[in-house]
Image (spheres, rainbow, N blue to C red):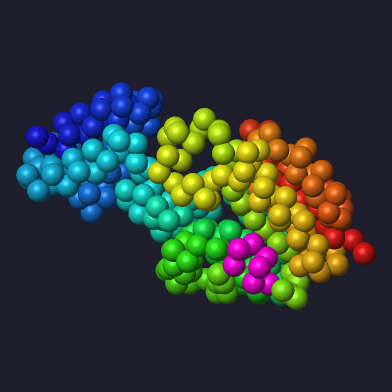
Amino acid sequence: MNVAQILDDATTQIAAALGLDKRVARLEARVLASHGWAVETAWLIAHDTDALSDKQIAAFQSLLLLRLEGQPIAYLIGTREFYGRPFLVTPDVLIPRPDTELLVELALERIPPDRSMDILDLGTGSGCIAITLALERPLARITAADRSTAALAVAHRNAEHLGARVEFMTSNWFAAFSGRKFDLIVSNPPYVAAADPHLIRGDVRFEPLSALTAGQDGLDDLRQLTRSAREHLQVGGTLLMEHSYDQAEAVQGLLRTHGINDAYGWADLAGVSRVSGGKLSE
């Protein structure tokens, strides 16, 4: 069996098993092959008629079988790109998604590049938000927290790998921050309802449930964040939170209820409101 044959066969299997378009399935087959054989994608094209050894076939097939079971590509190859940088990921953290880049963009608009600010990222997971902010705004003082020590270990590795200066702390939301205030607080908290049918489909089946779900309506952690944020924001400070496509009205109501003024929502490129936030006025 040569390179082209094994990729063609894998493409057909992935498309059928996971219900993917053939072009997406082909891309996934190439990603698995590149990882399994430690080669660049260009090598696959240049060597498409090369015969494969039994060892190469076995390495590829072991990855393919896991993917056919539905395991996410990011967990299989151990990385996912976010904001143009490769982040290490394991099953201890959520897989970074393009949707969250909107939260980063909004945060960057509020962090001047020429002066320091105190920034807090709550529920940091892989650290992709905090690390991106630290790299894009090197004068900012970035603190990132998560209640999961396993997730923090992944975030630490990412910060070291990418050369980002971030203070990491173990904390269940604001629990470890008594008396500390910040100019900007950002969070991509769990916001999926416990009975949401999407939890038994696709990649999320393999992601940590505690990082996905937040009570019966998905708002439990967003309630806690908005209720406690006032104590930890400087006057004029901003809170920004990612949420589900259908939670904008509820989240902005929570912000107003708990004294975070100028509550507002921002839509992603598809026109779906994905981030809400506001400022703490005097």
How many numbered marks does the figure carry?
0
Residue 77 in view (yes/no): yes
| Span shown in magenta | 171-177
In this picture, residue 63 sits left or right of residue 53? right
Foreground pick, 201 / 102: 201
In the rendering, at what x and y percent does residue 13 appear? Answer: 25, 27
**Is residue 172 inside the magenta stretch?**
yes
Q: Quadrant of the N terminus?
A: top left
Residue at 52% in and 58% down: 125
Q: Main secondary structure of the magenta part?
A: loop
In this picture, residue 274 sits left or right of residue 52? right
In this picture, residue 171 sits left or right of residue 25? right
Q: Quadrant of the C terminus?
A: bottom right
Q: Is residue 260 above or below residue 253?
A: below
Foreground pick, 27 / 50: 27
The outermost residue toward the front is 216
Q: Please tell me in which quadrant of the rendered image residue 104 appears.
A: bottom right
In the rendering, at what x and y percent does residue 57 appear? Answer: 13, 42
Residue at 49% in and 47% down: 209
**Is residue 183 inside the magenta stretch?**
no
Q: Please tell me in which quadrant of the rendered image residue 226 appears.
A: bottom right
Foreground pick, 256 / 121: 256
In this picture, residue 61 sits left or right of residue 205? left
In the rendering, at what x and y percent does residue 196 appear? Answer: 55, 33
In the rendering, at what x and y percent does residue 242 appear? Answer: 65, 48
Residue at 20% in and 43% down: 62
Residue at 52% in and 50% down: 210
Residue 99 in view (yes/no): no
Q: Is residue 94 above or below residue 216?
A: below
